[in-house]
Image (tube, rainbow, N blue to C red):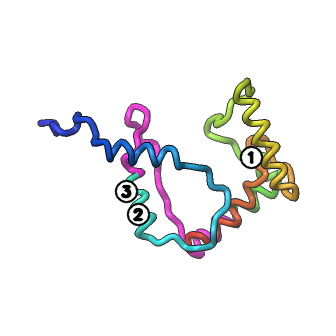
Amino acid sequence: MSQNPNLYERPSPEAIAAVDTAIRSRHSMRAFLPTPVPRETVEAILEVAARAPSGTNTQPWQVHVLTGAALARLSQRILAIHNDPAAAAQLKEEYAYYPSEWVSPYMTAAAKWAGICTACCRSARPTKPGCTPSTAATTASSTPRWA
């Protein structure tokens, strides 16, 4: 099987600039408009995301796209568990996403974020460790987004 000889050529300056722009302009989004995302947009995003690298090419993802009533049912189930401490206590994560003990500089950055988040979400009740106070608000606000 022959390899594509262009695979190892240096990308053009325009391609490099496009990647730099994408990286530099990224930001976290924690609130969403109720505007539906067109199916074509979701498909285009998933087509590009399918090219994302994974460790040793394991490609450990599965994608499920929900809309309408199915999305609303799932969102309601997530919120019900989130708001029920007994139900939430029964959940076990597959792996530790966050370290069990934070050290500097990460502890400092996490404390700064917690202060910002607390100031923004004073009405949100405290949640289990690892959850942000905005979890329920984010889940609820994104519910109609994929309608």
Residue 115 location in percent, x, y? 82, 43
Q: CA distance from mark 1 to mark 2?
A: 29 Å
Magenta stretch?
49-76
From the image, tell me which residue sits under label 3: 47
From the image, tell me which residue sits under label 2: 43
Q: Is residue 66 magenta?
A: yes
Image side of residue 35 versus residue 12, left or right: right
Mark 2 near mark 3, Cβ–Cβ under 8 Å?
A: yes
Who comes first in sequence, dot 1 or dot 3?
3
Image side of residue 2 versus residue 109, left or right: left
Task: Spot the residue most to the left.
Answer: 2
Q: Tell me the quarter of the image containing the C terminus.
A: bottom right
Q: Amino acid at mark 1?
A: Cys
From the image, tell me which residue sits under label 1: 131
Up the image or down, 9 lies above or below 138; here it is above
| Other residues around mark 2 within 10 Å, as few (<14) / some (14–19) / many (≥20) | few
Residue 112 location in percent, x, y? 78, 38
Q: Amino acid at mark 3?
A: Glu
Write the residue at 38% across / 45% down.
17
